[in-house]
Image: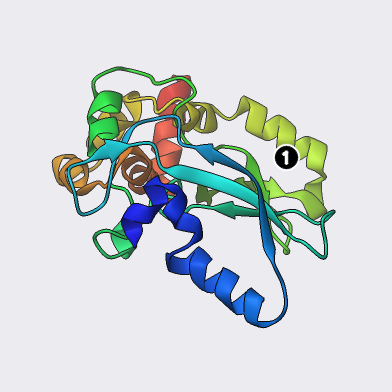
Amino acid sequence: MHLANFSMDLFHKGVFGRLAQELGQRGHQLQILSTAASERIKTQPGSSQRGKLIKDASFVLQQYPDAPILLTSSTIDAYGRAELLEEGESVREKEFLAEVLGRMRSPGQGFDTDLMFWFNGWATLFSAVHVCLGNVYEEGAETVLARQRKDPLSRALADFDCRLLDFYAEKKDDLDALVASATGPHHLFHRLTEDADMRLHMTRRLIA
């Protein structure tokens, strides 16, 4: 089932297949509008085969052609939480992790640092919700957006800046264990920045 994420079988098997079947029983038909594959080659879960997985797809119910629905593959660990899934349920990106750790920065290949807005007004990084840039209800969106543009930690995460590993090691002695157990760079940098005191230390070091 999980290997279907690397082929058009994704739309006939697994979660999407069950959705289509359930909708069909209710008299609806799905129409796939477009699909997009991952930019990087990835290793298929449970095998050594490598390829591009289907990252997302846009589809509609035929009765509602003007209301597209976006599907994002659950095999992508942009949130740094693949450790919570069973082996084979997400793509482990050890190769990408090794590539990131082999250079100081990886422009365009880091966290999704777009802001996520919460019902209570919080504005957090999309892929690291523990990084909160303020409250839009209390401060206004322009203030929060300006703060993000100036935030050195957000920029460092966006670039997978490997200086963060050195800053982490200045305070804690379990860096090697974190790297060894990381499912990919998103997971690693997510864990590096979970602690508020550590984020403060990293920010101070980045602006020093």
Residue for point 27% across, 58% down: 88
Local secondary structure at mark 1:
helix
Q: Position of residue 188 (x, y in %)?
A: 31, 42
- In the picture, which quadrant includes the N terminus? bottom left
Residue 167, image quadrant: top left
Residue 170, image quadrant: top left
Category of crowding for the residue at label 1, using alpha-carbon neighbours closer than 10 angstroms: few (below 14), some (14–19), many (at least 20):
many
Viewed as shown, does residue 45 lie left or right of 173?
A: right
* Residue 170 visible: no
Per the image, the residue denoted by label 1 is: 144
**Amino acid under disc 1:** Val
Along the line of sight, the residue nearer the viewer: 186 or 153? 186
Along the line of sight, the residue nearer the viewer: 202 or 159? 159
Is 125 above or below relative to 23? above
Residue for point 46% across, 49% down: 8
Is 107 above or below relative to 164? above
Q: How is the image coloured?
A: rainbow
Is 60 above or below relative to 23? above
Residue for point 38% across, 36% down: 52
Along the line of sight, the residue nearer the viewer: 18 or 173? 18
Residue 23, image quadrant: bottom right
Q: Position of residue 196 (x, y in %)?
A: 44, 49
- In the picture, which quadrant includes the C terminus? top left
* Residue 190 visible: yes
